[in-house]
Image: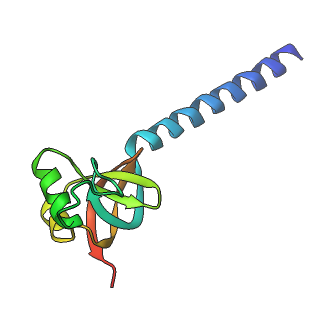
Amino acid sequence: MKTVLSAKASLVLATAALLGTVSMLAQTSGAQKTLTGVVSDAMCGQTHMMKDKSDAECLRYCVKQGSKYALVVGKTIYTLEGHEAELDKYAAQKVTVKGTVKGETVTVESISPIK
């Protein structure tokens, strides 16, 4: 009886370890997602600080100063990586971004404007 119970306990622990490993791999590799929001920069987020410039001009200035492109989705601000030329083209516009999300960073695969 002890052997059967011990074997069941071992099986449960092995299954839990396997599921934990799969879960960690999924978090590490990131999830494919499609997000819709406004192209901004990581410094300004939703509210651009240069009041004498348009949102697009402020965004471009901040990026030249070293800030990263960002996507504002509701109250969440995702830092964007890749496709900088396209992101610049859609500065301060509403777009759909497809990419791999890890935490609050999106590795961009494609961008399309909202019509």
Most foreground residue, 22 or 101: 101
Relative side of 57 to 96, left or right: left
Residue 69's quadrant in the figure? bottom left
Pick the quarter of the image with the C terminus. Answer: bottom left
Q: How many marks?
A: 0
* Depicted 32 relative to depicted 67: above or below: below
- Quadrant in the rendering for residue 25: top left
Name the one closer to the observer, 74 or 7.
Answer: 74
Q: Is residue 33 left or right of residue 40?
A: right
Query: Is 49 rendered above or below residue 7?
Result: below
- The residue at the point 18 percent across, 62 percent down is 52
Place of residue 67 in the rendered image (x, y in percent of width and height, measured from the top left): 19, 46
In percent of the image, x 17 and y 67: which residue is there?
Answer: 86
51 on left or right of 65: right
Q: Is residue 110 above or below residue 113?
A: above
Q: Between residues 76 and 100, which one lies in front from this camera angle?
A: 76
Q: Residue furthest front?
A: 52
Asked whether residue 110 is in view, the answer is yes
Residue, far bottom: 115
Q: Position of residue 24 (x, y in %)?
A: 49, 36
Percent across and percent down for residue 17 are 59, 28
Left or right: where does residue 54 sit relative to residue 113? left
Q: Quadrant of the N terminus?
A: top right
Note whether residue 83 is visible.
no
